[in-house]
Amino acid sequence: MTVTFPSELIERLRAAQSVAILTGAGVSAESGMPTFRDAQTGLWARYDPAELASPAAFRANPVLVWQWYAYRRALAEAAAPNPGHYALAELEQHIPDTTLITQNVDGLHHRAGSRNVVELHGNLTRYRCSDDGAPVEVTIVAKDAPPRCPRCGGLIRPDVVWFGELLPQHAWNMALAATRRCSLFLCIGTSGVVRPAADLPLIAQADGAYTVEINLAPGALAGQLNLHLYGPSGTLLPALVVAAFGERSSIG
Ligand code: BV8
């Protein structure tokens, strides 16, 4: 599939000294990871992810929430990065000051080779004690109930940010700094609904960056950014890197 991009985007990408990227669940969709907006499949069809991804749900039903994350962790471990993930890792080779700010918790950007990744909402392959907050190593993910913290006996939870919880301060500071210094901001595969992550492209634009959305279809950011490109990120991103920097290496 040959894709042509506006020359302004290609020129800005080639000239960029600093790029910030915000990714959402759409970047992992072609790796087989269900997005939040997709109807949940199978056992989880009757649950609303926003309900399950909350402290209240974990307090009310720790077993159900733990099982949902164990299911998603198994999906993430079975998934492979797709050409979109690899293209973003390749971009870092061409523009060293590239910050990949992700809302995703599946770890696929790291596995694709991206190095400067800011996990705004944590990572579901890491765990912490819900009482003392300290990290806890979990090697075997029990499929039934959350294990107890070896230090204080508190319930262990995934190291992700739930709705109503503050983002990790360091991650937010890094994301904001990258957003403020970039000349080009790419917003990829996100519905642009969840805050404060969804504020970042608008902050970049207010600070003079050229902002681009790549998505399957218009969402909450439609019409607000400088450029909107619609199509699968697994196709558009590799094509964009080739268009700007020539044939890619064999990875991905
Ligand atoms: C907080 C981890 C302070 C867990 C997640 C204003 C300011 C601040 C906060 C708020 C505010 N207004 C409301 C709030 C509260 C809330 C919020 O934003 N609610 C929304 C629903 C209105 N925000 C918070 O609670 C945040 N905390 O702000 O703390 C505070 C505290 C208390 C009170 C007030 C403020 C914490 C939010 C983090 C929640 N945790 N994830 C887990 O994953 O289990 S959010 C989770 O949902 C994801 O991480 C992600 O961020 C979000 C889903 O969004 P997307 O990634 O965009 O995915 P989605 O399915 O929606 O869309 C997929 C997109 O991909 C679509 O557009 C689709 O078209 C596209 N697509 C599909 N396939 C492809 C594709 N694109 C390209 N190619 C394809 N192939």
Image (cartoon, rainbow, N blue to C red):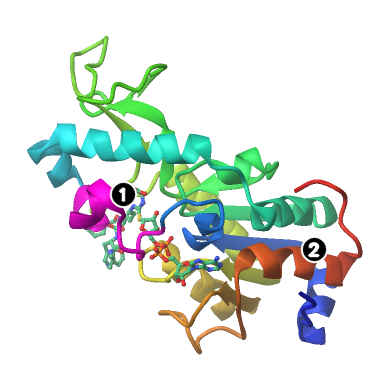
Q: Gap between marks 1 and 2, in whole Å? A: 31 Å
Inspect this view and state whether residue 182 appears: no
Residue farthest left in this picture: 60
Residue appearing at x 38%, y 63% in the figure: 196
Q: Look at the numbered disc 1 and give the secondary structure of its residue.
A: loop
Residue 17: which numbered mark, if any?
A: 2
**In what quadrant of the picture does the N terminus appear?**
bottom right
Does residue 235 appear left or right of residue 27 in this picture?
right
Residue 19's place in the image compared with 222, above or below, is: above
Residue farthest bottom in this picture: 223
Inspect this view and state whether residue 154 appears: yes
Q: How many marks?
A: 2
Residue appearing at x 28%, y 50% in the figure: 42
Residue appearing at x 43%, y 62% in the figure: 197
Residue farthest front in this picture: 42
**CB at disc 1 and ligand 1 closer than 8 Å:** yes
Which tag, 1 or 2, sits closer to the chain's start? 2
Picture quadrant of ligand 1: bottom left
Amino acid identity at mark 1: Leu
Q: Nearer the viewer, residue 16 or 186?
A: 186
- Where residue 88 appears, as percent x and y from the top left, is 70, 56
Does residue 69 appear left or right of residue 210 in this picture?
left
- Where residue 213 appears, as percent x and y from the top left, is 58, 76
Give the quarter of the image for residue 198.
bottom left
Residue farthest right in this picture: 246
Which residues make up the magenta segment? 35-52
- Where residue 98 appears, as percent x and y from the top left, is 71, 55
